[in-house]
C-alpha cells in the first residue's frame, strides 16, 4: 500500500469507522518500535491532538533507557507532548506471582486509565499481522469462534486504527517518510509463544500459501460474522431450554437432547457457567446414570434429578460476566429476558418504567454487554451532576444486601450505560440531537 494511501485511509478510519469525540485527546501508546512510531507520525500529521505515552519497564537495562530517550525525541520532533512512566516490573511480578509479560500489560493499562479523561481515547499500534497472530494463538488455546475473529478495532476508549494495515505497509510508510525506529531485541527470541508463532509458525504457513496474511483478512471477517450468527442461535436455544422445576431454574433433559446440535449449545452454556471440559463430559455422561449426581463450579451447582438438571445459583453468587446483548433481539441472563429494539427518535415517548431504558445509540462504543456490578464501578446517574460510585448510589437508594448482590449493569466500551432496573447513565440519555434509540426492556422469564 502506498504511503499516501495509508495516510488517507488512516484519516478515513478515524473519521468513519472509529470516530473521535469532539475535543478529545488521543493518547498514543508508543514503545518506539516500528508500529507505534508510524502511529505517532500518522496521528500528528493528521492534525489530531495527541500525547505520546511511553512505559519503561526496566526489563532490558540500557536498551530500555535508550527506548525512552528515543520516544522523548520523537515527541519533540512531532511537536507533541510525551509522558513517561518507569516501573520496577520484575519486583512487582515476583510480589504478585505473575509473569513479567502479564505484569507489564496490567501496569501499562492501569497507568493509561489513570491519565485519560472521560472523553479521551487511547490509540494502540496493533496491525493486521498482530491480528493474525492473535487469531492463531486463540486457535491453539481453544477459545472457539470468538477468539478466531481476532482483535476488535474498538474496546471502550481503546482504538486500534492500524488493524487494516500489514506490517509491510507500515514499514514502507516509515521508509518513505525517513522514519527511524527502535528494534526490541526480545522480539527475536522464540522464548515467548507469540514470538514463536511470528518467527516460526507463520513463515511455515507462508511457504504453503504466500498470501497467507492477506487470506486471513477475509477469514477473520468471516469468523466475526459466524460468531454473531452463532450467538443468536445460542440465545434462542437457551431461551427455549431453560425453565423451572422444584423451585430451581432447570433444563429438562428429554426436551433438549432431541434437538440437533444440543451438545454444542449446552457445552457452551456449561462453560459460561464455569465448568471445564472434563466436568462437561461428566454432566453429559450423567444423562443415562442414576439421579442425584452433583456438579459444582465457582458459579453454580448442577443437580441431576431424574429428567432434569437443576441449576442452584444460590450455591454461589450468580456472577454474570460480559453476556453480549443481542441487538435487536432477546438475550437470556439468569432468569431475566432482555429485549432490545431500535427506534427512530421521532415520536418516541420515554417510558418511566424502571425496567425500560432508552439509550442514544450513537453514543455507544462497541459491543453492549450485561454483567454483574463490581466494587469500584461508577457512573453518571441521570439527572445528577458528576459521577458517583455505584455502591454509594445503591446505599442512597436503600437497596437491601440480598438484592444488591443480584444487581446487573449494561455496559458499552467499559462504561456503564444502565444500572438495570434503576437508572441509566446521563452520558447516554436521549437529547434533541438523538437520531436512533436503543430500547431495552427486561422481564423475569417466569412472567413471560
Image (spheres, helix red, strand yellow):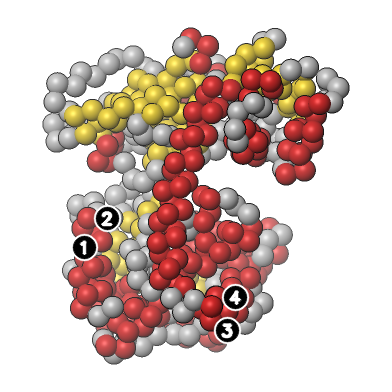
User: Which residue is at the front of the view, 298 or 373?
Assistant: 298
State how far apart marks 1 and 3 are (Cα): 34 Å
Q: In which quarter of the image is residue 152?
A: bottom left
Residue occupied by mark 1: 12
Label at residue 17: 2
- Per the image, label 3 sits on a secondary structure element best described as helix
Give the residue drawn at x 27%, y 16%: 351
Residue occupied by mark 4: 201
User: Quick check: 284 left or right of 89?
Assistant: right
Q: In this view, does 126 lie above or below 152?
A: below
- Quadrant in which the N terminus appears: bottom left
Is tag 2's residue or tag 1's residue first in the polypeptide sequence?
Answer: 1
Near mark 1 (Cα within 10 A), the count class, few <14, some 14-19 or many ≥20, is some
- Residue 336 on image: x %, y %: 50, 21
Near mark 3 (Cα within 10 A), the count class, few <14, some 14-19 or many ≥20, is few
- Per the image, label 4 sits on a secondary structure element best described as helix
Q: Can residue 346 be seen in this view?
A: yes
State how far apart marks 4 and 2 are (Cα): 32 Å
- Per the image, label 1 sits on a secondary structure element best described as helix
Near mark 4 (Cα within 10 A), the count class, few <14, some 14-19 or many ≥20, is some
Is tag 1's residue or tag 4's residue first in the polypeptide sequence?
Answer: 1
Marks 4 and 3 in Cβ contact (< 8 Å): no
Near mark 2 (Cα within 10 A), the count class, few <14, some 14-19 or many ≥20, is few
Q: Is residue 294 above or below residue 162?
A: above
Give the residue drawn at x 31%, y 41%: 364
State how far apart marks 2 and 3 are (Cα): 34 Å
Closer mark to the observer between disc 1 and disc 4:
4
State how far apart marks 1 and 4 are (Cα): 33 Å
Marks 2 and 1 in Cβ contact (< 8 Å): yes
Residue occupied by mark 3: 188
User: Quick check: 401 left or right of 438?
Assistant: right
User: Which residue is at the front of the view, 99 or 436?
Assistant: 436
Amino acid at each position: 500500500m502506498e504511503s499516501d494511501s495509508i495516510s488517507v485511509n488512516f484519516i478515513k478510519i478515524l473519521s468513519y469507522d472509529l470516530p473521535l469525540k469532539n475535543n478529545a485527546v488521543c493518547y498514543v501508546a508508543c514503545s518506539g518500535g516500528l508500529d507505534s512510531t508510524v502511529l505517532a507520525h500518522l496521528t500528528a500529521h493528521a492534525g489530531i491532538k495527541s500525547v505520546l505515552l511511553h512505559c519503561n519497564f526496566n526489563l532490558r537495562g540500557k536498551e530500555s533507557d535508550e527506548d525512552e530517550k528515543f520516544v522523548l525525541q520523537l515527541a519533540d520532533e512531532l511537536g507533541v507532548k510525551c509522558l513517561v512512566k518507569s516501573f520496577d516490573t520484575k519486583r512487582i511480578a515476583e510480589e504478585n506471582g505473575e509473569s513479567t509479560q502479564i505484569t507489564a500489560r496490567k501496569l501499562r493499562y492501569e497507568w493509561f486509565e489513570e491519565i485519560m479523561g472521560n472523553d479521551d481515547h487511547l490509540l494502540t499500534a496493533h496491525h493486521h499481522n498482530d491480528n493474525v497472530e492473535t487469531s492463531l494463538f486463540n486457535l491453539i488455546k481453544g477459545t472457539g469462534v470468538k477468539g478466531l475473529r481476532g482483535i476488535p478495532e474498538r474496546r471502550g476508549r481503546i482504538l486500534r486504527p492500524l488493524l487494516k494495515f500489514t506490517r509491510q505497509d507500515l514499514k514502507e510508510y516509515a521508509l518513505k517518510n525517513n522514519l527511524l525506529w527502535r528494534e526490541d531485541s526480545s522480539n527475536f527470541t522464540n522464548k515467548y509463544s507469540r514470538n514463536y508463532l511470528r518467527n516460526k509458525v507463520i513463515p511455515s504457513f507462508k511457504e504453503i500459501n504466500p498470501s497467507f496474511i492477506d487470506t486471513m483478512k477475509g477469514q477473520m471477517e468471516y469468523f466475526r460474522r459466524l460468531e454473531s450468527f452463532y450467538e443468536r442461535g445460542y440465545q434462542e436455544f437457551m431461551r427455549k431450554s431453560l425453565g423451572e422445576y422444584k423451585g430451581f431454574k432447570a433444563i429438562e433433559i428429554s426436551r433438549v437432547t432431541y434437538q440437533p446440535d444440543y451438545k454444542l449449545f449446552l457445552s457452551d452454556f456449561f462453560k459460561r457457567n464455569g465448568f471445564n471440559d472434563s466436568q462437561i463430559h461428566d454432566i453429559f455422561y450423567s444423562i443415562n446414570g442414576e439421579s442425584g449426581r452433583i456438579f459444582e463450579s465457582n458459579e453454580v451447582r448442577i443437580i441431576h434429578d431424574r429428567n432434569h438438571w437443576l441449576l442452584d445459583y444460590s450455591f454461589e453468587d450468580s456472577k454474570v460476566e460480559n453476556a453480549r446483548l443481542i441487538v435487536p433481539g432477546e438475550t437470556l441472563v439468569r432468569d431475566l429476558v432482555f429485549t432490545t429494539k431500535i427506534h427512530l427518535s421521532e415520536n418516541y415517548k420515554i417510558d418511566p418504567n424502571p425496567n425500560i431504558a432508552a439509550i442514544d445509540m450513537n453514543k455507544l462504543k462497541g459491543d453492549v454487554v450485561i454483567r454483574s456490578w463490581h466494587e469500584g464501578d461508577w457512573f453518571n446517574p441521570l439527572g445528577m451532576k458528576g459521577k458517583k460510585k455505584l455502591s454509594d448510589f445503591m446505599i442512597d437508594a436503600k437497596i437491601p444486601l440480598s438484592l444488591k448482590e443480584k444487581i446487573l449493569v449494561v455496559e458499552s466500551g467499559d462504561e456503564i450505560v444502565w444500572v438495570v432496573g434503576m437508572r441509566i447513565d446521563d452520558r447516554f440519555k436521549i437529547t434533541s440531537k438523538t437520531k436512533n434509540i436503543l430500547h431495552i426492556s427486561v422481564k423475569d422469564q417466569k412472567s413471560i
